[in-house]
Image: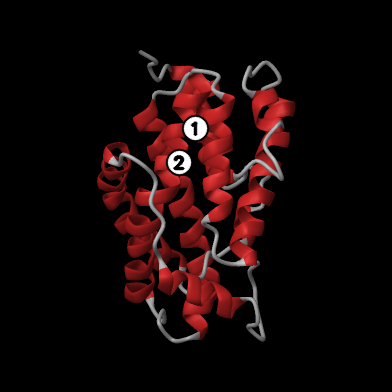
Amino acid sequence: MTTTTEASLLHLLWLASPALPVGGFSYSEGLEAAVDAGVVHDETSAGDWLLNQLELVQARAELPVAAAAHAATLALDGTRLAELNAWVLHTRETSESLQQAQQMGRSLLVWMQGLMPDATVLPLLKALKPAPTWPVVMGAAAASRNAALEPALQAIAFGWAENLMQAAVRCVPLGQTSGQRLLARLVHAIPQAVAAALAAPEPMAFTPLLGIHGARHETQYSRLFRS
């Protein structure tokens, strides 16, 4: 069984870093539209919103896809990777969320080609059309550095949480200390989200309110973020 060695742990920290050049900082994933609608207006409501997204989106969709991509990478199963990639593309409800999945996936693949040129999964990822998607490439990148599955999902979830906390600080807006309290709420909930993702037989996607806010964001008058 694959174990998380000291080296692979450092690679997980690297993958979870907001400094990774994939453009994650430019997306709020519907949060900005929720602020504009008055649904999110302070630290508590921002935390509630993001905890819901952790449970309904990350635990049910993004993390299960990353987990399945992790397994497919270890097996070098290009067919399974293509199935997962197609699922992600087909379940994006707005043009902005589709753009995010593809743009961040492409950017992470470029990063892998430059920093992980020995990864045997690279040809399979490059074959994904029209573009590799973010959760698929993240799962593959973690597996390519021999990271065990559960820590890999924890790192992916933490990277998402830190990015969305920073989005909340900018668009609610919140102070830095409020942002850290919000992040603490998310970190406390990540183990349960990862456990749910590991137990999920297949990814699931049903977030109509998020889709509505995402669609509204596309015509929002003033925006800081791309989603």
Of the residues shown, which amino acid type is indicated by label 2? Val
Image location of residue 42, percent across then percent down: 39, 79
Of the residues shown, which amino acid type is indicated by label 1? Ala
What is the quadrant of the N terminus in the image? top left
Place residue 130 in its image quadrant: top right
Of the pair 124 and 35, the residue shown nearer to us: 124
Residue under the image location 67 percent in, 30 percent down: 112
Of the pair 164 and 103, the residue shown nearer to us: 103
Q: Which mark is residue 69?
A: 1
Residue under the image location 39 percent in, 15 percent down: 2
Per the image, the residue denoted by label 2 is 65
Residue 41's place in the image compared with 211, above or below, is below
Image location of residue 4, percent across then percent down: 40, 20
Residue 11 visible: yes
- Asked whether, in this view, residue 208 is left or right of residue 76, the answer is left
Residue under the image location 49 percent in, 25 percent down: 72
Q: Which mark is residue 17?
A: none
Which SS class for mark 1?
Answer: helix
Residue 97's place in the image compared with 190, above or below, is below
What is the quadrant of the C terminus in the image? bottom right
Report the number of numbered marks. 2
